[in-house]
Amino acid sequence: MSHTTREKQKLLNRVRRLRGQMEAVERALEEEKGCADVLQLIAGVRGAVNGLMAEVVEDHIQLHVADASLDQTQRNEGAAELIDVVRAYLK
């Protein structure tokens, strides 16, 4: 997956932030924090996972899905439309 290699550090940083968020959920559960606090932490994790997925999918679309026979403008427009659809789905 060349696109993940190209953006490796950026993706790893996102994963590390996710790990930190999951550790916060674990601590909240261990400390018997209120349900609202735990749910808020979980919602943050879900948003972060969706953001990570959107980034990988976006790169995949741009590098592997867009039709190479189209001119660059058409490819960019088509990829942008598909990316918008995927991002809306992941929210």
Image (spheres, helix red, strand yellow):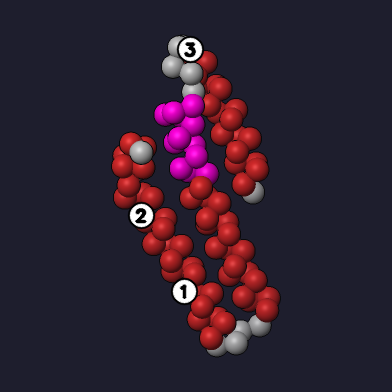
Secondary structure found at label 2: helix
Report helix, strand or loop for mark 1: helix
Identified by mark 2, the residue type is Leu
Residue drawn at (57%, 82%), measured in percent from left and top? Answer: 29
User: Within 10 Å of the Cα at label 2, are there few (<14), some (14-19), or many (20+) other Cα atoms?
Assistant: few
Residue 46, quarter of picture: bottom right
Q: Earlier in the sequence, mark 1 or mark 3?
A: 1
Packing grade of label 1 (10 A; few <14, some 14-19, many >=20) is few
Residue extending farthest right = 36
Q: CA distance from mark 3 to mark 2?
A: 33 Å
Range of the magenta residues?
54-65
- The kind of residue on which mark 3 rests is Leu
List x then y, in percent, for residue 77. Answer: 55, 21
Q: Residue furthest front?
A: 1
In the figure, 29 relative to 49: above or below?
A: below
* Residue 50 versus residue 27 in the image, above or below: above
Q: Secondary structure at mark 3?
A: loop
Q: Is 39 above or below relative to 61?
A: below
Which residue bears the numbered disc 2?
A: 12
Question: Could you tell me what secondary structure mostly forms the magenta stretch?
Answer: helix
Q: Residue 80 at x, y = what percent? A: 55, 28
The type of residue carrying mark 1 is Glu
Mark 1 sits on what residue?
23
The residue at the point 42 percent across, 29 percent down is 63
Report how far apart the C-alphas of labels 1 and 2 lie in the structure: 16 Å
Q: Residue 17 is drawn in which quadrant?
A: bottom left
Question: Which image quarter is the N terminus in?
Answer: top left
Query: Residue visible at 63% across and 69% down?
Result: 40
Q: Provide the residue designation for mark 3.
A: 70
Q: Earlier in the sequence, mark 3 or mark 2?
A: 2
- Of marks 1 and 2, which one's residue comes earlier in the chain? 2
